Every structure is written in C-alpha cells, then in structure tokens.
Image (spheres, rainbow, N blue to C red):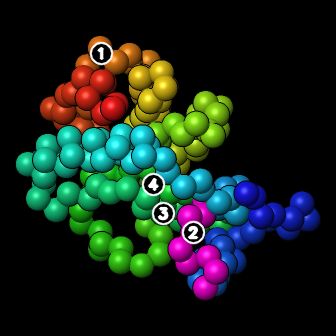
Amino acid sequence: MVFHSVERLITFESFEDFLEQPENRDRRYELIHGEIVEKTMPTEQHGIVVTRFLVRLYPHLERINPDVRLGPEIRVRTPGDIHNARQPDISYFADTTRPLSDRGVVERMPDLAIEVKSPTDTYQELRERADYYLANGTRMVIIADPAERRFTVLTPGAVRILNEDDVFEGGDVLPGFQMRVSEVFP
C-alpha cells in the first residue's frame, strides 16, 4: 500500500511523525522517494531465510569484532536525503565506533544489505533497492531468491549470480566468510 500525493513528496520528518501515530506503531513502513510504502508481512519462508543468514553471519562477524552490528529490519537513511528511509531485511555495519542507535533511524547505509525476495516482490523492485543502497554507500547487496534458490550479489560496478551449489564468499565486506548458497534456503 502506498501513501502519497503527486503534488507533495513526504519528507523524512513527516514520515517520522506518521510512524509515531498509534495506528502505525505495529506496522512496517518505508519512505521511498517521498512515498510512504507499507511493507508486506514476511512469510514463514522469508523468516527462515533471514534467520539462516543471521545464524551463519553472526558467529563469523563476532569473532572479528565482539560488538558486531548485524540485525533484521533496521531502518536506515543517508544524512541529507529527506525523501528516503529504507529497511533492508538484514543490515550489517562494519563501523562500531558510532553510538548505537536505540531509537529511530540509523543515519547511514549499511556496509551489507540483504533483501529476501518475497512472492509479492518483483526482481525489478529489488534491483532498484539494491541500486539505491549501492549509490548511497552500501558496499555489497545480496538479493536472495528462495523460489530460484539463488543469490544476486551486487557490489559497485559488478553483479554476480550464484546458484544453490555455488559458494558465496564475503570478500572485503565479510572477510573470510564462506557458505554454500543452499544453506539459507529451506
């Protein structure tokens, strides 16, 4: 569901006010190019894929830095961008020196964003999300497609397709991390 006006784009400040309304507190929204977009509720399959990513990534990242910043559904935005506040399915922030956000939005893009394709998502929508993240400082985006059992791994200037028997390697974003693509799919 999209809430917008052709004449007026919603700003981040108005979006935050919208989220504070009692009727919106238990719902999931993003601000995308000045439009308030309600995220669909995740399916069981979606939740399992997100969980499998987290349980594989967290121990590896915790060995590198015990103050690991990895989590689901963290709202992020680029400072100065008044028309966007996004919420990747999973976000990883390598920098742990900034204060931990305990309210509202994180004022930066994650180093890694993972989006899990739901049946209602189009690949084009997910690719546009990935392009937005990369254009605003994210170093790697993974689009995980449970139906096709594959990853699309995007980094600035490169796109790789990995099928279920391929091994994903984390490169500079997740140094030393490896897993078979099939490990996250039920």
- Residue segment shown in magenta: 22-30
Q: Does residue 17 show up?
A: yes
Q: Which circle marks residue 27 in the picture? A: 2
N-term mark: 2 or 4: 2
> Which residue position holds label 4?
109
- Residue at x 34%, y 43% (from the top left corner): 48
State yes or no: discs 4 and 3 in contact (Cβ < 8 Å): no
Q: Residue furthest right?
A: 7
Q: CA distance from mark 1 to mark 4?
A: 28 Å
Is residue 94 part of the magenta span, yes or no? Answer: no
- Quarter of the rendering containing residue 173: top left
> Which residue position holds label 3?
75
- Residue at x 30%, y 15% (from the top left corner): 166
- Kind of residue sitting beneath label 2: Arg
Relative image position of residue 70 (x, y in whole percent)? 29, 55
Q: Is residue 150 above or below residue 24?
A: above
Q: Is residue 33 left or right of residue 88?
A: right
- Kind of residue sitting beneath label 4: Met
In what quadrant of the picture does the N terminus appear? bottom right
Mark 1 crowd level (few <14, some 14–19, many ≥20, 10 Å Cα): some
Q: Which circle marks residue 166 in the picture? A: 1
N-term mark: 4 or 3: 3
